[in-house]
Amino acid sequence: MAIQGVLIDIDGTLVISNDAHAHAYVEAFAEQGYEIKFEAVRPLIGMGSDQVIPRMVAELDGKEGVGKKIADRRKELIIEKFSSNLSPAPGSRDLIQRMKQDGFKLVVASSATSGELSSLLKAAQVEDLLGEEPQTTSDDAEASKPEPDLVQAALSKVQLQPEQAIMLGDTPYDIQAASAAGVRVIAFRCGDFKDDQLADAIAIYDNPADLLQHYEQSPLGQRETVQAK
């Protein structure tokens, strides 16, 4: 069964945004009286707020009370303050164009909210390419990455079995979520995670441009079937 679809993370994968998310968390926590260090929250970027907030302050819940205020404020900061200064990862647009040309079913698999996602797709300069494709956001899942809910929802939206898809991601949480759903991952280093943290990916490239340069030899170019562990 050949690979037919590609699940695409956006933050850190198509747009260089992970540091911005960490800074937004620091500001949002500070507004509620919590001093959270950038260095503490940065390694957690790639998880949803429902996962990050209680890891930073145990008594908070990212879905209600003060924790929800922090989560909502972080979203506002990304859209209002940081998104205009974000840069696309090298090769993002060209890679999306190549995958569309090759006939892959594409689906966005992001922990972002729908409002954040629109800003991030613009920052990645792929809004016109992915704006009409199926999109899975935090609204589609009870729990965010590293739980598998988002990946399972993305598979459902394009009606694919796990072995028919590959995910593009940049964090260990993408890999954990995809693996739990039976999907293998091509990982990018442009999210600033180390290779040992991405070791369970089927392949690791510097960024979308690097994958595109080696496209013919990659799992996408060969459309090879990859069985889940």
Image (cartoon, rainbow, N blue to C red):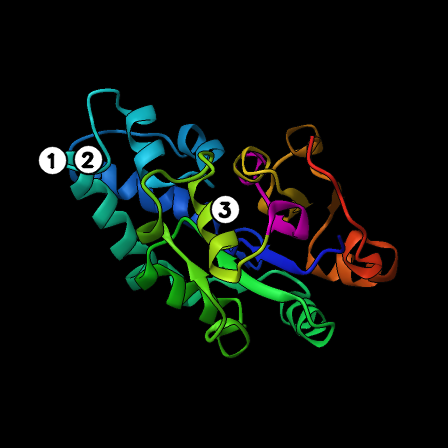
Pointer 2 and pointer 1: residues touching (CB < 8 Å)?
yes
Q: Along the polypeptide, which appears first: circle 1 or circle 3?
A: 1
Residue of label 3: 151
Look at the picture and state if 87 lies above or below 63: below
Estimate how packed mark 2 is, as few (under 14), some (14 to 19) or many (20 or more) residues with alpha carbons within 10 Å.
Answer: many
Whole-Å distance between the Cαs marked 2 and 3? 25 Å
Residue closer to the observer: 26 or 69: 69
Q: Residues within 10 Å of mark 3 (few under 14, many from 20)?
A: many
The residue beneath circle 1 is 65
Amino acid identity at mark 1: Gly
Q: Residue at x 69, y 54 (%)?
A: 207
In the rendering, at what x and y percent does residue 132 appear?
Answer: 47, 76
Q: Earlier in the sequence, mark 2 or mark 3?
A: 2
For this orientation, the residue located farthest to the left is 65
Give the left or right position of residue 194, taking residue 215 as reference.
left
On the picture, is 116 further left or further right than 59? right
- Which element is circle 2 on? helix
| Neighbourhood count class around disc 1 (C-alpha, 10 Å): few under 14, some 14–19, many 20 upward | few
Using the image, determine if residue 7 lies above or below residue 55: below
Toward the viewer: 33 or 56? 56
Q: Nearer the viewer, mark 1 or mark 3?
A: 3
Q: Amino acid at mark 3?
A: Val
Q: Which residues are magenta?
A: 161-176
Question: What is the spatial separation of the Cα atoms under label 2 and label 1, in whole angstroms?
Answer: 5 Å
The residue under label 2 is: 67
- Residue drawn at (50%, 71%), measured in percent from left and top? 133
Identify the secondary structure beneath mark 3. Answer: helix
Q: In the rendered structure, does residue 169 fall within the stretch colored magenta?
A: yes
Residue at 47% x, 62% y is 86
**In this view, the mark in front (2 or 3):** 3
Q: Quadrant of residue 196?
A: top right
Estimate the x, y position of residue 222 in percent, counting from the top left. Answer: 84, 57
